[in-house]
Image (tube, helix red, strand yellow):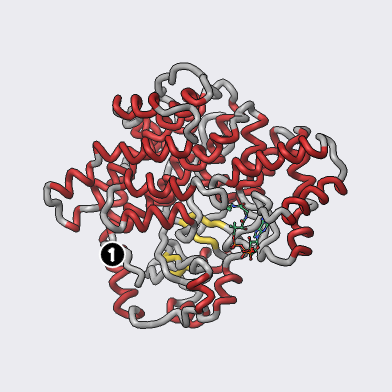
Amino acid sequence: HQTLKERLAELIPAEIENVKAIRAEHGKKSFGPVLVDQVYGGMRGLPALLWDGSVLDAGWCSLYFPTYFSFFGLSLSSSPHFPPAFDVMQLLTMSYSIEYLHLFSEEGIRFRGKTIPECQELLPKAPGGSEPLPEGLFWLLITGEVPTAEQVTELSKDWAARAAIPEFVEELLDRCPTTLHPMSQFSLAVTALNHDSSFAKAYSEGVSKKEYWGPTFEDSMDLIAKLPNIAGRIFRNVYGKGKVPEIDPTKDYSWNLSHLLGFSDNHAFVELMRLYITIHSDHEGGNVSAHTGKLVGSALADPFLAYGAALNGLAGPLHGLANQEVLLWLRKMQDKIGKNASDEAVKEYVWSTLKGGQVVPGYGHAVLRKTDPRYVAQREFALKHLPEDPLFKLVGQIYNIVPSILLEAGKAKNPWPNVDAHSGVLLTYYGLDQMQYYTVLFGVSRAFGVATQLIWDRALGAREYYLV
Ligand code: FCX
């Protein structure tokens, strides 16, 4: 059977031609004006970036197009293999208005055209499991195709075989003070992996541009494979959990991650990791971590350097660190108003957060305009596995209260919860209550999406960023 790299090698030439054809036919067309507000406003709604793996999009487009060129919420393709519902020109015309871009962004994430429930249904599962294996999601992100169970098993084995981290990186982590935030430790260890980068080595030996994608692929596979050992070591060092166990080459990626953290005996936790890594993997290109990875990679910094930079962005409280912030906020709320507080008391607490000039963590989004489907997937997991958990009930209570308050306050464009409003509650339930660690798990997952884009960018000859 075919390996992921072999399949990718087959897909690249056609995609290069596809991009050439789009640029030849549409290269001088415009998506419309750039507004001063967009320049000041973090480029929101500005179609300015290619992103292949996923798009925040409505259903109609994704149903027809297997390959995406997403522009901050708009995707299009001129692939000749599928009946286009709208051709590229229509899309260019329709997307002229910024409102359309927002309209397109209401459904939430699709990975290569597939919603989270579709991925849950279609991607291979572990024996006895019901959540998708992230190995399958990675295959889907890279190729646009649903892999076979056998292909997924081969990826699990390949990642297990690449999982060891260099001794000096282990020592580097062991020397970090336990007071250094887990995300800072994560970023520094990932950056240090650049020591053995295939891409950096190939570049120094004069590799041709046409071959860039090969060593980028190897580095990306190594990066993803090594993250559990880094994440596991940080967890055990910071929280005094003893020696990191060995990776089991017969098990899948999420089982091994759970094992290194000390939770693999709990089947439900392992299932949670499979779901968690799948849904946090990619969220098109405009968010800070994805954008940073692409930007830094565009200077031909290798995937370790690019992803180290992406992690530093993910560590910001308005982005990935929000999963830590949500739990801290919930705990503070419980300390202040007690564990079974009334709706009135919760409302008052939410207002006091807003009046203090702080954000309600886990709510709002730069692109989404409804409840994040990643939140919904986690809520469904909770309903199945922990319906009576008090903290889960509090999250549900807050869901009924916060949106109307944010609407009444009148500032947030999206009053609904995002992915980070739910993840910490699930982890806490299984005993992983070290909140400062939560963003590391997000960081393990987000590598899948950033790596996919780095590989395709090198394959398609993406240019270095130069914005002015
Ligand atoms: N609580 C309070 N105020 C909020 C808010 C929230 N949850 N969400 C937005 N606002 C405020 C903004 O701070 C802004 O105020 P300002 O005019 O005084 O600057 C105003 O509403 C308009 O912001 P809006 O356009 O709706 O949102 P942005 O695109 O600027 O920002 C984020 C989006 C996600 C940063 C914002 O909603 C927020 O701060 N949310 C809380 C933090 C969070 O949950 N982040 C995680 C996001 C995501 F899922 C992830 O990356 O992991």
- Give the residue pinned by disc 1: 463
| Residue drawn at x 65%, y 32% as measured from the top left | 428
Position of the C terminus, as image quadrant, is bottom left
Where is residue 148? Give x, y as percent.
Answer: 43, 42
Where is residue 305? Give x, y as percent.
Answer: 32, 46
Side (left or right) of 210 relative to 269: left
Position of the N terminus, as image quadrant, is top left
| Label 1, ligand 1: CB separation under 8 Å | no
Question: Furthest-front residue in view?
Answer: 356
| Residue drawn at x 45%, y 65% as measured from the top left | 70
Side (left or right) of 122 relative to 14: right
Question: Furthest-top residue in view?
Answer: 242
**Could you tell me which secondary element the residue under label 1 belongs to?**
loop
Residue 188 appears in view: yes
Side (left or right) of 247 relative to 2: right
| Residue drawn at x 33%, y 41% as measured from the top left | 191
